[in-house]
Image: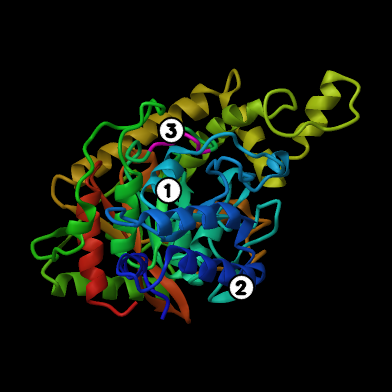
Amino acid sequence: MTPSALELRASIAGGFITATEACDSVLERIETAGPRLNAFITVSGERARARAAELDRAGAAGLRLAGVPIAVKDNICTRGVRTTAGSRILEHHVPLYDATVIERLEAAGALVVAKTNCDEFAMGSSSEHSAFGAVRNPWDVERTAGGSSGGSAVAVAARLTPLALGSETGGSVRQPAALCGIVGMKPTYGRVPRYGLIAFASSLDQVGAFGTTVADVATCLAVIAGHDPRDATSGVMPVDDYVAATRENARGLRVGVPRALVNDGVDAGVRRAFDEAIDVLRDAGAEIGEVTLPHSRYATATYAIVVMAEASSNLGRFDGVRYGSRAPGVETLFEMYSRTRALFGHEVKRRIMLGTYVLSAGYYEAYYLKAQKVRMLIRQDFERAFGDVDVIATPTSPTTAFKLGEKLDDPVQMYLADVFTVSANLAGIPAISVPCGFADGLPVGLQLTGRAWEERTLFRAAAAYERLTPW
């Protein structure tokens, strides 16, 4: 069996395997299995091997992730290693600096072995909108891996790397984690610095982590979390002992279930797995109650307006002058703009145009301003609910992994794949997805959402559930 990140770290610290051997083993698996799943865009073997050799020479004492290989979503900047965001407009982009999370991972001894495939500029729920082809689910290669961090989820689910980083704007860590049968965590907005994360929607974007166990993800988040003065949105709240929380039980934990939301539009097999998961938590000593989130039915529409408006603003810089590729052989300014921006894929163009529309004169108040007001109502719903419960439980996704191509021509149905995840992003609160069984042979995820800055409570609940199940 492939070891977890913490098991591998213990083997390296104990001298049973070197960091170089661990690195070479992972790179060999990526070379063998990676192409079939299309999970990677760039492999950074030279960088990873150099860091591994350094660790073997200097020793791994005190480093929390010493020698542990990790894959990183390709919208997180890596110095000297191509970072494309899944787009042709950044196809040849090689950053001159590392994102804060990369600096912190390597300082903790992690080996960045590859950049993972993703929806272009993280815009998608199926990892089919990448300029480098669709990512394939290891449980069924004809199905989606989820998105937009599909490549990172597949890297962990297929046991190609023990850990991976993704990014979240509306569920892009938790949803692929659920569809691929692994653990995925989205922290509180501001908990993990965004410096070096290519912007999609700046009031929503954040970096999250994937692993095969809750303890692995807790360890990874503990490494990358904390204030960074280079990120104006980075929080100053102290980072708790997340790993210690994974050793606690669920006795006395108050779990709220928004039944009206869960019973609407959820596949029968997913609902059955979710109900069984709630029974496990109840048997573990958790107190199960019902909560109401009355404005959550507006979350998908609200999210769509906010995210498209911010995408339109953020992607304005890719014009052939300031950032990214420039179309060759142009003669006029307009031709340069139009041909350069034609390098964007279809979904990115759709979001830019809709975002520009909702921000335009005459429509700003009707759409964007109203969406921001509803966003506040959604946040207030959570605040009221957390007066009575510690965590809120829902399915992560209303369905299991759908067929590749199934929803490409129906963007509304594609956006609805994130119906249970977008609310946490709008409210800026943490959430985690853990495997909770199967429906028709495909993985189902249990989502636990918590109060802002209380990731520790989520790790406690998720680990307590994990210990009592075989998933």
Q: Earlier in the sequence, mark 2 or mark 1?
A: 2
Q: Which residues are magenta?
A: 193-197
Residue at 78%, 26% (x, y): give it. Answer: 337
- Determine whether the residue tagged by mark 1 lies in a helix, strand or loop: helix
Residue at 45%, 44% (x, y): give it. Answer: 102
The magenta stretch spans residue 31: no
From this viewpoint, is residue 256 visible?
no
Specify the farthest residue to the front.
57
Q: Position of residue 459 (x, y in %)?
A: 24, 58
From this viewpoint, is residue 9 visible?
yes
Residue at 22%, 57% (x, y): give it. Answer: 243
Q: Position of residue 401 (x, y in %)?
A: 52, 68
Image-based side of 157 in relation to 469, left or right:
right
Q: Which mark is residue 203?
A: 3
Residue type indicated by callout 3: Ser
Q: Which mark is residue 54?
A: none
Q: Which residue is mark 2?
A: 33
Q: Which residue is mark 1?
A: 106
Q: Position of residue 136 (x, y in %)?
A: 61, 67
Q: Earlier in the sequence, mark 2 or mark 3?
A: 2
- Determine contact: label 3, label 1, CB under 8 Å: no
Residue type indicated by callout 2: Ala
- Determine contact: label 2, label 3, CB under 8 Å: no
